[in-house]
Every structure is written in structure tokens, then in C-alpha cells.
Image: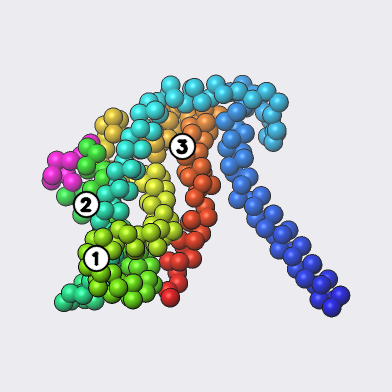
């Protein structure tokens, strides 16, 4: 017994050590980003050996980041794009997942298989098709042009469908006996039960929209519709970011903080949603 306890303690100590090393590797870039953003321009350029601690932090870099480019405008554009895209996507995928999981109609399995086959199409081809469509509809440099190609997701429909199917059929049959409509059953029963998965999908979509770069860069050339990803690229390209690295890091911190806060608030629901989405029954 003593040998087993000793081996167990050694194993736990090794696991905690490896987790600590991994956490340091993962978190150090974030620490360095924040640290650099708090260094003055002169102090940063005068360093011959990188300093891992500072005694005289400054927030001037954050002011410089917002004055170098209209970062506030880009931030607002990103919020509008993220909220509208995520909201519209949920209005599309939730009824679609419910239909594939609970409603009986001819050709349901064939249609769903066709949906899944769309995941095999390379992203580049989808972007080209969407670009041609948006240009033909004269939607470049518009919020609709940014939002419409992202209002659905086959993968999220599949994930939510699998979660809906894990809900016992007896609940649906009992609800139908009581005269409950499909819409009311979806809103009152299925969505509350599948809340962890839905929250996970929402957060993943928010992160996807917030970090979106290729499509906004392709479809917008008017700075009034730039997102934060375009703003960071503009700071880097206009020379300001190359000369003033601390201000560049300050802009990155401002953009990263909302996602970090979002994850910290909903981390438990994310873990629960991922585990529920990966199992049935």
C-alpha cells in the first residue's frame, strides 16, 4: 500500500510538473505581449537584453494605438459583425438541427448526407464563390456583404443535431400528446437541455468572427468597414507598427481582451458543451 501511495504521489507530481511547464509555454506569449505594451517607446528601443519585468509601466501606448488608426471604429465594426453574424447563424442552425433530429420527412437522411458532403469542399472554392456572388450583388463594403456568407455552418448543424438526438424520444412523444407544437417543444424543452452545446457554439462562432481576416480583407477596401484584424494589419503596414512595437502590442491586447474575458466567464459551459457534443445517450 505504501508503495502504491508513493507511486501515486510521484505520478501526480510529474503530471502537475508537466502541466506547469505547458502552462508556462502557452501563457508566456500573452505575458510578453502585455509586458511590451506597458513599456515606453524609448525604454523598449534602449533594451539590449530583453527585460522580463518593468518598474515604470505606461499606458501611453494604448492611446497611441487608438490615434494611429481609427481602432475604435474597427472595434465597433467587429462587434456589429460578430453579434449580427452569430445571431443570424443561430436562427438558421437551431431549426435546421431540430428538423434533422426530430422531424420525419421524405429524404431527410439523403438531404443531411448532402449537407455533410459540403464540408468536403475546400474553403478556397467557397470563398471564391461567395466573392463572386457578393460582387454581383453589389455588396462590397457593406455589412451585409460581410455577414451573409457566414450565417450558416454545416458543422454546427451536425454538432447540434447530435446533441438534440441524445434527448429521449419519450419527451417529444409526451409533448405531442399534450398538444405541444414543435416550435414550443424546441423552445421550452430542447434548447434548455442543449444549452451547454448552444453556448459553446455561440462562443466558438464569436471567436471565429472576431478573428476573421481573409474574408473581410477580401470584401472591404473602405476603411469605414474594416474589422480589428484589418486594423492590426494596417498598423503594421503603415510603418507605425514597425517603428512603435509597444503601441502595436497595445492594440493587440485591446483586441484580445474581450475573447479572453468571454472564455473565462463561460469556460465551464464550453467544457460541458464539448463533452455533450461528443457523446450520445
**Which of marks 2 and 1 precedes in the sequence?**
2
Q: Look at mark 2 in the image and give the residue it sits on.
A: 130
Name the disc covering residue 255, or none: 3
Give me the disc on residue 180.
1
Which secondary structure lies at badge 2?
helix
Disc 1, SS: loop
Residues 42 and 120: in front is: 120
Mark sitting earlier along the chain (3/1): 1
Q: Quadrant of residue 77?
A: top left
Of 278 and 150, which appears nearest the observer?
278
Q: Is residue 27 left or right of residue 208?
A: right
The residue depicted at 52 percent of the width and 52 percent of the height is 267
Residue 205 at x, y percent in the picture: 37, 51
User: Residues under labels 2 and 3: Cα distance?
Assistant: 27 Å
Image quarter hosting the N terminus: bottom right
Closer to us: mark 3 or mark 1?
1
Based on the picture, tell me whether residue 135 belongs to the magenta stretch: yes
At horizontal 51% and vertical 46% (from top left) the residue drawn is: 265
Q: Estimate how packed mark 1 is, as few (under 14), some (14 to 19) or many (20 or more) residues with alpha carbons within 10 Å.
A: some
Give the crowd class for mark 3: few <14, some 14-19, many >=20 residues within 10 Å: some
Is residue 59 shown left or right of residue 1? left
How far is disc 1 from disc 2 in space, using C-alphas? 40 Å
- What range of the chain is rendered magenta? 134-141
Residue 180: x and y, percent?
24, 65
Picture quadrant of residue 7: bottom right
Residue 121, percent from left and from top: 28, 64
- In the picture shown, does residue 183 fall above or below 224? below
Amino acid at each position: 500500500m505504501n508503495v502504491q501511495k508513493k507511486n501515486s504521489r510521484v505520478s501526480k507530481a510529474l503530471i502537475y510538473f508537466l502541466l506547469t511547464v505547458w502552462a508556462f509555454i502557452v501563457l508566456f506569449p500573452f505575458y510578453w505581449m502585455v509586458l511590451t505594451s506597458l513599456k515606453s517607446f524609448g525604454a523598449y528601443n534602449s533594451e539590449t537584453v530583453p527585460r522580463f519585468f518593468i518598474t515604470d509601466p505606461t499606458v501611453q501606448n494604448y492611446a497611441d494605438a487608438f490615434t494611429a488608426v481609427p481602432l475604435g471604429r474597427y472595434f465597433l465594426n467587429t462587434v456589429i459583425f460578430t453579434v449580427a453574424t452569430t445571431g443570424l447563424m443561430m436562427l438558421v442552425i437551431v431549426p435546421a438541427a431540430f428538423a434533422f433530429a426530430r422531424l420525419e420527412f421524405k429524404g431527410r437522411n439523403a438531404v443531411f448526407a448532402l449537407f455533410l458532403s459540403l464540408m468536403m469542399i475546400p474553403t478556397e472554392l467557397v470563398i471564391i464563390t461567395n466573392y463572386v456572388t457578393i460582387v454581383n450583388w453589389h455588396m462590397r463594403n457593406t455589412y451585409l456583404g460581410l455577414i451573409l456568407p457566414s450565417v450558416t455552418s454545416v458543422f454546427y448543424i451536425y454538432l447540434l443535431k447530435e446533441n438534440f438526438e441524445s434527448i429521449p424520444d419519450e419527451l417529444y412523444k409526451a409533448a405531442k400528446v399534450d398538444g405541444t407544437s414543435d416550435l414550443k417543444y424546441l423552445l421550452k424543452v430542447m434548447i434548455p437541455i442543449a444549452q451547454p452545446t448552444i453556448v459553446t457554439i455561440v462562443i466558438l462562432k464569436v471567436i471565429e468572427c472576431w478573428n476573421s481576416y481573409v474574408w473581410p480583407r477580401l470584401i472591404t477596401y473602405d476603411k469605414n468597414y474594416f474589422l480589428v484584424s484589418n486594423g492590426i494589419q494596417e498598423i503594421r503596414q503603415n510603418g507605425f507598427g514597425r517603428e512603435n512595437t509597444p503601441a502595436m502590442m497595445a492594440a493587440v491586447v485591446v483586441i484580445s481582451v474581450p475573447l479572453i474575458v468571454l472564455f473565462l466567464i463561460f469556460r465551464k459551459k464550453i467544457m460541458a458543451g464539448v463533452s455533450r457534443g461528443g457523446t450520445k445517450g
